[in-house]
Image: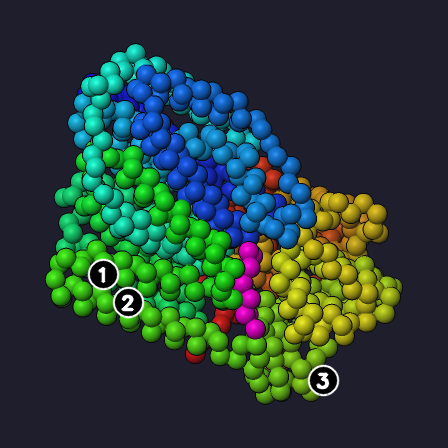
Amino acid sequence: MKPHTVLYSIITFLSALLLFLLEPIIARQLLPLFGGSAAVWTTCLVFFQCALLAGYLYAHLLTKRLSSGTQGLAHIFVLTVAMLSLQFRVKPIADTITWHPIRALLWLLTATIGLPFLTLAATSPLLQAWRASKGGSSSWWLYALSNAGSLLALLLYPSIVEPQFTLRSQVVLWDSGFCIFAALCGALALQYRRNAVPKAAELPAIQSQPSLLWILLPACASMLLCAVTNHLGENIASIPLLWIVPLAVYLLSFIVAFASERAWPRFLSVRMLALTLAVFAYLLYTSRKALPLQISIPVYTAALFFACLYCHAELYRLRPAVTALTRYYLFISLGAALGAIWVGVVAPNIFHANHDLAIAAIILAATALAASWQSGWIPRLIWASAAIGLIYVAFFQARILGEDTLVELRGFYGSLRVTETHLPPEAETTRTLYHGRIQHGTQLFGNGLRTQPSSYYAHDSGVGLALDLCCNGRPRRIGVVGLGAGTLAAYGKPGDEVTFYEIDPLVVRLARALFTYLRDSHATIRIVPGDARLSIARDTTSPPYDVLVLDAFSGDAIPIHLLTAQAIALYRRHMQPDGVLAIHISSQYLDLAPQLALQAQFSGLQAVLIHSDADDARGIFAADWVLMTAEQNLLRRTEIANATQPLRQIPGLRLWTDDYSSLLPLLKWNAAQTQATPPQMPPP
């Protein structure tokens, strides 16, 4: 291989590696500011796709509007400014985060990583164009190499980078890598300028018209990527590991599709797409049923892979001559950006429920119909039938989800529903708050049950015991991170003060309008909007809490930034010396108890795990709570001692800090690890 070809390959691979290491690193940095919501990653995907479009546009304009000699100088200038911007940091405004999270997040991403991201994104098409202008052979393999670097980055992050390096170290290493990349790319730009082809000898641009499929196909793949990511984040767990998996298979589909036409024959691509659409139809039809972790992740990611592989293989089949590749990549990135914008920005503002996956599957079937239109009547009939069938399934899903539903709302932090049923019969009327598929609180209105705490918060639950047994009958200050239906307000007595911290304004609206816990409470109720950790840190005047409850769920688990050593230290500073920290850890997919045992030991606290059983007649769910306190006498009380279970230990488990966290050791991969699990939607 020629030396200049090796240099092109190294720079292309390094740029992609850095680009896709930057994505999870910056998302980890911003996640705590926005309450640990799964929507943070979806909005990041919108930014990444739009920034990729900007990078491709920059590469296109640079190669088409400037002479070969000027291109090198211009790119060196941009690389230099990008390096200087690495230390630029923006301090977010708390009110903007709470009320305009999408705007705040996009602004933060643009201000902090916008220019470095643009230069990295522009590298692959720019270098392919430079190589083609020098009479190089086909450069499509560079695009596959670029995606291989991206995939490697996504595999390295959860397996090596996140477990072995603190967040601060990750940033320093990435900045160093970017400086090396900039130096290599600058050297290549100087070499390109010295060997510039005279204007008259430059290759003429072809005049072939772009295809609309250059936009539709990548838009479908991007929509599916965001929709599947949303589903995993809302209904499973809002963790970087799960966000990375869909993006990894999305990139893998690019690698396979652009390696060569022989890598994935079209007849196989078409047949696998038909099977994939059938899988999507089944998942939509049975959307109320929860799949185990070891099944749900492979099924969703495999379906995403084959759908994206079809889209990207068709894109490769429709590729133009190499002289038009920057325009080709520009249209691909435009389609990808439009797909991400639809799911991340438009859909949450026009739909009350999450129908992203259904809409994406329907559009994919319609796009397949357009792509195969020239193939005859049989393919047209197949894809038209698939589209019609998916439309039927989508309406069926919407009708099933709408049964017993009083209201549906959708915002940045997810999809919310409140249902009203007459089960159990003793309740006469029961209202339930859902976040995605997960139940986040119920209220029973009949037979004197209206003021009784239900769901995870019964008197024999960990939090119920803590609230009933603490404080020796004196007025209490109770802090609750996460409002839900407001159930814990039922524990309020005259003289008590209960402060709820809630980041989602829609949850506050529903708790006040459709549940009565807040207005029925005998305590003084206060609701503080915004992320709880930031709000608690800003409060320097309020008296300390007797009991502080962590019940803020994003998907199926408490966001990581609320459970780090620094977070626990913050809570202790705002609690009485003998105060109790009650942490809700019921989860289908994560066992947080071993990490909390470490946190308690590090903080000098005693910790116990309390498991309580379900009671369907009273609307009580099985629940797991961890109680942390320095007051050992409370933990010796008979009611707590009899309910205590040992906290599971994991040898070698590292303490979570703001600079380090890894969820891999805590994932529940089999049913034997599961204790209490949050109830799902009942089957239709």
> In the rendered structure, which segment of residues is drawn in magenta?
407-417
* Circle 2 Cα neighbour tier, 10 Å, few/some/many (<14 / 14–19 / ≥20): many
Quote the CA–CA distance across marks 3 and 2: 50 Å
| Quadrant of the snapshot with the C terminus | bottom left
Whether residue 188 sits left or right of residue 459 in the image: it is: left
Which residue is rendered at x = 66% and y = 69% of the image? 511
At label 3, the amino acid type is: Gly
Callout 3 secondary element: loop
Residue 297 pos. (x, y %): 38, 56
**Eye-nearest disc, 3 or 1:** 1
Callout 1 secondary element: helix
Q: Which mark is residue 211?
A: none
Which residue is rendered at x = 18% and y = 57% of the image? 372
In the picture of the structure, the residue carrying the numbered disc 1 is: 369
Quote the CA–CA distance across marks 3 and 1: 58 Å
Q: Is residue 230 above or below residue 332?
A: below
Q: Which mark is residue 387?
A: 2
Label whose residue precedes the other's in the sequence (3 or 2): 2
Label whose residue precedes the other's in the sequence (1 or 2): 1
The one nearer the camera, 336 or 261, is: 336
Quote the CA–CA distance across marks 1 and 2: 9 Å
Whether residue 378 sits left or right of residue 140 in the image: it is: left
Q: Which mark is residue 448?
A: 3
Whether residue 117 sits left or right of residue 166 in the image: it is: left
**Circles 1 and 2: CB atoms closer than 8 Å:** yes
Q: Is residue 414 above or below residue 408?
A: above
Q: Is residue 408 magenta?
A: yes
**Eye-nearest disc, 3 or 2:** 2
The one nearer the camera, 471 or 26, is: 26
